[in-house]
Amino acid sequence: MVTNRTFTMLKPDAVEKGHVGAIIEKITASGFRIVAMKLTQMTTADAEEFYAIHKERPFFPDLVEYMTRGPIVAAILEKDNAVEDFRTLIGATNPAEAAEGTIRKLYAASIGENAVHGSDSDENAAIEGAFHFSGREMF
Ligand code: IDP
Ligand code: MG
């Protein structure tokens, strides 16, 4: 079980607004090594499976619509304490509550369209990374 990796997505709003380069620069400048990375687009079935834990929430249909409307950048990142440190780097789910200098404070528009995903546990990091990447795409 890998414990020093996390999984991220630069969500459709971040790609649409041209923030990919700036966000990747901030991630690598913060000490994360890129293990895997690609531009891809989730299908409705992909998004429903990826966010299955939220399927009873009122925002679920909007979340699936948002996450499938355009390309995302999916990536696996490596660093000591990766999951926790990456959640700190991205900030709170609601950008209005995110700390100064965090990716969501800088680039997110709202709690729904919040620019970036970060895994919430080592277990989910492994599941989410394997959802998007084969072993041959990980370095
Ligand atoms: P997280 O992305 O910070 O881990 P989660 O609670 O796991 O936050 O929610 C997953 C995603 O669902 C959020 O990143 C956001 O895009 C969306 N979301 C969460 N809560 C709300 C809400 O109250 N309204 C609209 N969208 C939400
Ligand atoms: Mg979450």
Image (spheres, rainbow, N blue to C red):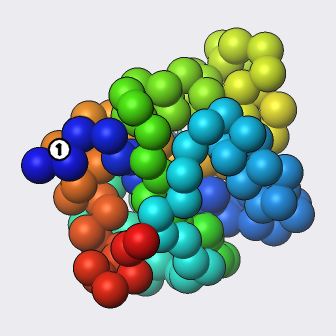
Residue drawn at 25 percent across, 69 percent down = 130
* Relative vertical location of residue 86 with respect to residue 40 in this rendering, above or below: above
* Relative vertical location of residue 48 with respect to residue 54 in this rendering, above or below: below
- Name which quarter of the figure residue 80 lies in: top left
Residue drawn at 48 percent across, 26 percent down = 85
Is the residue indicated by label 1 positioned so its CB lies within 8 Å of ligand 2?
no
Residue drawn at 63 percent across, 57 percent down = 10
Horizontal and vertical percent position of residue 115: 67, 48
| Along the line of sight, the residue nearer the viewer: 15 or 129 | 129
Residue 21 in sight from this viewpoint: yes
* Relative vertical location of residue 127 with respect to residue 4 in this rendering, above or below: below
Horizontal and vertical percent position of residue 34: 54, 59
Judged left or right of residue 53, residue 136 is right
Element type at mark 1? helix
Judged left or right of residue 32, residue 46 is left
Judged left or right of residue 22, residue 9 is left
Horizontal and vertical percent position of residue 39: 61, 79
Judged left or right of residue 57, residue 99 is right
Residue drawn at 40 percent across, 82 percent down = 137
Q: Residue furthest left?
A: 1
Residue 54 in sight from this viewpoint: no
* Relative vertical location of residue 130 with respect to residue 86 in this rendering, above or below: below
Q: How many marks?
A: 1
- Label 1 neighbourhood size at 10 Å, few (<14), some (14-19), many (20+)? some
Q: Quadrant of the C terminus?
A: bottom left
Horizontal and vertical percent position of residue 11: 62, 59
Q: Which residue is mark 1?
A: 123
Q: Give the residue type that dot 1 points to.
A: Glu
